[in-house]
Amino acid sequence: MIKKKRTHTRIVFISDIHIPYQDKKALAMAMDIIKDYNLNEEDSVIIGGDLVDYYPISSFSPDLTQSNIDLELFEAVEWLNELRKLAPKSNIFFFEGNHEQRMQKKIMSCVSSLAPFLKNRLSIRELLEFKKFGVREVKTPFSLRQPKVFFLHGHEKKGFITPKHIANVNLMYYNRNVIVGHHHRFDMSITTQLDGSLLGGWANGCLADLSLLPDGLYSSFDSTQRGITVVHTKTNGFFSVEQHLFVPNKQKGYECLVNNKGYTSK
């Protein structure tokens, strides 16, 4: 029997987990969805930045009595281990968000003379043991060969802050198909070119609960949205983007429907 060649691959984009302030219910549901996708060696997972929060080295006067970088890193390594078990054959890519960049900024501001020595030893790829888990660190804007979609964290262009129309702002600026995180909210914008072709911009939600931050900065009103984004691609360059929004329910959890299967957070 001749095995039929696959023409359809998946790219799972997850961002803004902010360990140790992850939304445990949302993250668990995301992992259940990833498991059911049964990703293979042609599929990819892209971790789009802010995997860790690095709260203790924040510039916002952190409460150091309620934070621990060792705990952040330990939990992040544990999560990477779990992700690799769920997707043992797939490609896993990672690029930095603004929170991972806090470490290098702290090094430069406090011990710049040791920067060449510390830069590699305290890099996120070393601290989270990327080599052990087969995670490839990449730079943004990042794109796989197919489809021509560019992935970014979303903080790269200075001055964006959190625009009302996140997807459209990024689409207009980059003039490419683009998917970003950073803003913790879903959004989509499509434009038709003069030749009839389409360009799209998408903003991904988060998997964090920033109301857990010790300073209470986000405790009054949480306007963020939880979920993940999945890109389905064909070898001819055609692609389709699915945004899986985790809808809050009355049990203070989430629900989502993916591939005709209902998911409810535990």
Image (spheres, rainbow, N blue to C red):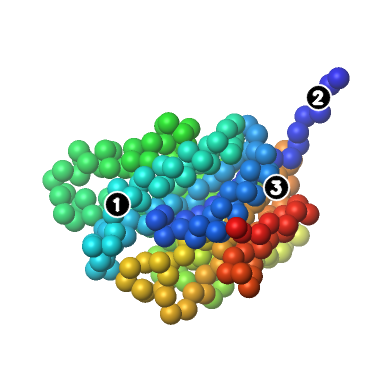
36 vs 219, left or right, is: right
Q: Nearer the viewer, mark 2 or mark 1?
A: 1
For the residues bearing labels 1 and 3, Cβ distance under 8 angstroms: no
Residue kind at label 1, given as amino acid type: Ile
Of circles 2 and 3, the one toward us is 2
Front tag of 1 and 3: 1
The disc, 1 or 3, on the residue closer to the chain's N-terminal end is 1
Decide: few, some or many residues near mark 1? Use Cα within 10 Å; few <14, some 14-19, many ≥20.
some
- Residue 192 occupies quadrant: bottom right
Instruction: For marks 1 and 3, give the CA distance.
Output: 36 Å
Nearer to the camera, 241 or 130:
130
Which numbered disc flags the more N-terminal residue, 2 or 1? 2
Q: Mark 2 points at which residue?
A: 3
User: Which secondary structure, mark 2?
Assistant: loop
Point out which mark residue 232 bears.
3
- Provide residue 209's location: percent of width, then percent of height: 46, 65
Quadrant in the rendering for residue 25: bottom right
Q: Can residue 97 be seen in this view?
A: no
The span from disc 2 to disc 3 (Cα, nearest Å) is: 21 Å
